[in-house]
Image (spheres, rainbow, N blue to C red):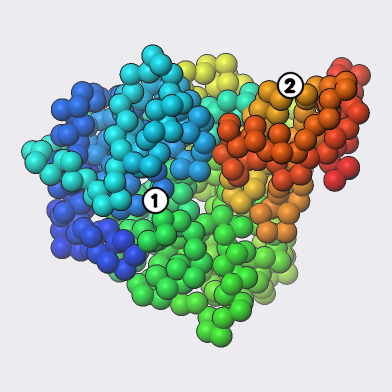
Amino acid sequence: MNLALWLARASRDFAERDALFHGTKSVASYAVLGRLVAQTATWLSERGIRVGERVAIFMPNRPDYLPLLYAVWYLGGVVVPVNAKLHPKEAAWVFENSGAKLAFVMADFNKALENELNSKSVIELVPLNSNSLLEFSVDCIPMAPVERNNDDLAWLFYTSGTTGRPKGVMITHGMLSAMALNYFVDVDAVYKDDVTIYAAPMSHGAGIYNLMHVLRGAGHVYPLSGGFDPSEIFTLAAHFGSAHMFLTPTMIKRMSQIASKREDKPKGFRTIVYGGGPMYVADIIEAVDIFGDVFVQIYGQGECPMAISVLSRKDVSDRSHIRWKDRLVSVGKAQSIVQVQIVDEAGTALPFGSDGEIMVRGSAVMPGYWNNPEATKTTITNNWLITGDIGAIDKDGYLTLRDRSKDLIISGGSNIYPREIEEVLLMCPGVEEASIVGKPHPEWGEEVVAFVVPKAGYEIRKEELDALCEHNIARFKRPKHYVCLNELPKNSYGKVLKAGLRKLI
């Protein structure tokens, strides 16, 4: 089933309800939103976009985002949401790898993207001004959603990989519908008077969570800042009175820090779902003390979006159970639509309490990576997703993450893979070797540390490496510290021992 049908029904059943807000101002009812989506779908069709073709969205959170998302689905296309924090060079690579025929971008991104695209690229860039709300499609005749099957692609999510290049996770209509319907079973309810505030990027989990709010005819609020500003969020939540958000642990920590300095406690939050990185026990305890019984934790990956496990509102807030702290350390129990198991290196299921590789299968697991059968083969085995995470399940079903089997760094809720940065640093003519590790950080979770070995007779300057990173990778991926070594620690096979590097920081 085409997910766009949910929006078409909402525009009929909740026609008079406010759908889109920019700040506290309503900019579209559900009836208006439905018309904008259907007209934009026609505009895309007239532009030559056909069923199954990819359309990219590269912009910060703004009221145009949701209509664009559904317009692509209306005509049977595949959305490629691109993190607005990426460097234009990185975004251009995603456009070309996905084979996108068209990309919606903010007007001030347009020139930089044109400079980065391959000279043979045929992608059309459609710049949007700050007042858009899709004025370019207002004269188009609305179309109806086309038929799509559950296994048809809906979303290509690019997540960085250990090869140094992002991989496109193929997310289907069936995966997203299963996740959304399961949300009502395991995570939370959504009511007609609720709003969801998009402070985290819509290219990630916050955007995926639009679905259940469309199903219930709830409101969609875009902060005027276009991003994460705690004071602005407090004002919006208090204004609307029943706010839902998806946030990373670092965002919650930042909100707690600011809220703790206020005379009055923040009001208006009904549910804050968090995930995307490690949440320290002291931080969530403080957050519950400040905001109350509003938190739910989910564990997911791009390959199984938002749908591996859930730590319920009760488990997050309960302090009476004899093992409440152990449960708070966990990421909860398997969600209803998936099966989770812990296996050893041979793939044999392990007993309760044993540490091993976390594997998942179910209706929310991806079919594979876009045009990357080798990566798919090493990640999906017998319909099981190999998560790359190490964990254990206790006798009560609670899953606790121990460590990451890959070298992923999570900073501020964003995934950072060392190989990407290492390849950029090796572009410097004076760098012989480079290795990246994560260093614990009290606010961001981790920060990036670069170890570099200079070539003989060459003195590496921090400014030179910073400039190289500035021109090739997003700001949040850039190293915060550089350490020069005569050589990198290695094992007998020549593999860099990152555990040894972590002991040096």
Name the outermost residue toward the top.
120
Which residue is painted at 9% across and 41% down in the image? 139
In the picture provided, is 333 more to the left or to the right than 425? left
In the picture provided, is 493 more to the left or to the right than 206? right
Check if mark 2's residue and mark 1's residue have beta carbons within 8 Å.
Answer: no
Q: Could you say which quadrant of the image residue 282 lies in? A: bottom right
- Label 2: which secondary element: loop
Amino acid, disc 2: Pro
- Locate the C terminus by quadrant: top right
Which residue is painted at 18% across and 46% down in the image? 135
Q: Would you say residue 246 is visible in this rendering?
A: no
Residue 442 in the image: x percent, y percent?
72, 59
Residue 421 in the image: x percent, y percent?
67, 32
Give the foreground label among 2 and 1.
2
Residue 211 in the image: x percent, y percent?
34, 49
Which residue is painted at 55% across and 44% down in the image? 300
- The residue where tag 1 is placed is 61
- The residue where tag 2 is placed is 429
- Locate the N terminus by quadrant: top left
Q: Is residue 416 above or below residue 454?
A: below
Closer to us: 337 or 131: 131
Q: Residues within 10 Å of mark 2 (few under 14, many from 20)?
A: few
Circle number at residue 147: none
Closer to us: 158 or 109: 109
Which of the marked residues, 2 or 1, is nearer the chain's N terminus? 1
